Amino acid sequence: MIWFRKKKKDNKKEERSQSKEAARGLLIFAHPTTVISVEELLRDEGYNIRVVSPPPTYRTGCDLSVEIPLESEAAIVELLHDVGLEPMDVVPITSEGMEPLQFVRVKDFGKYLMVRAANMKMTVDKETKIIVNISGGGCPDVPYLATSMIGQRLRDAPDPAEVGFSLCAYSLNTAREEIIKLIGD
């Protein structure tokens, strides 16, 4: 008779893997305007956060959530409670299916750089830094935003977050900030 010994699990490896996976979490909200307010508050307080698109299973009509370090969860939730911006849920990111979706995407077309944030896209001539196209979204302020920005240099164009008040304006502003990070204004 041959006896097989069951291989021991590497518990330390498993613990490291779980702690790495659960190092981040998502704050889930019902409305994009709440996410925008939470982002501003948490950045002002010095938290290392980012706005992301939640996985499909956690969409509540709002296509934005806030990714936070779970080590700060208690302090963040208490702060949000104190100012009346409580999340619907706090979800640890523990598996691949829970990974937030990429909110910002960059496409380099050689002479032009296009940045997409959610459904809004801004394309800029990399050399002149002139905005050549704005597209996407479905908010009523998108045509006004596009008209006021296309043909202007990045530094001279109005700030979409100050001109518009929709999720599209927020997304367009995110795209603009990413372009400025990449090529300057």
Image (spheres, grey):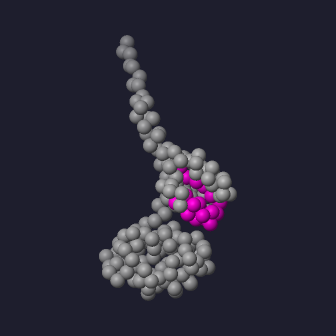
Is residue 39 visible to us here? Answer: no
Quarter of the picture holding the C terminus: bottom left
Residue 51 is situated, as x and y percent measured from the top left of the image, at 52, 60
Q: Residue at x 52, y 52 (%)?
A: 68
Give whichever of 180, 56 is nearer the camera: 180
Q: Which residues are magenta?
A: 25-43
Quarter of the picture holding the N terminus: top left
Residue 181 is situated, as x and y percent measured from the top left of the image, at 39, 69
Residue 2 is situated, as x and y percent measured from the top left of the image, at 36, 15
Is residue 25 visible to us here? Answer: yes
Residue 114 is situated, as x and y percent measured from the top left of the image, at 41, 74
Give whichever of 154, 2 is nearer the camera: 154
Give whichever of 122, 55 is nearer the camera: 122
Q: Residue at x 68, y 57 (%)?
A: 84
By secondary structure, the bulk of the magenta-drawn segment is best described as helix
The image quadrant that residue 178 belongs to is bottom left
Q: Residue at x 63, y 55 (%)?
A: 80
Asked if residue 40 lies in the magenta stretch, the reply is yes
Asked if residue 83 lies in the magenta stretch, the reply is no
Q: Residue at x 50, y 81 (%)?
A: 158
Residue 121 appears left or right of 56: left
The image quadrant that residue 6 belongs to is top left
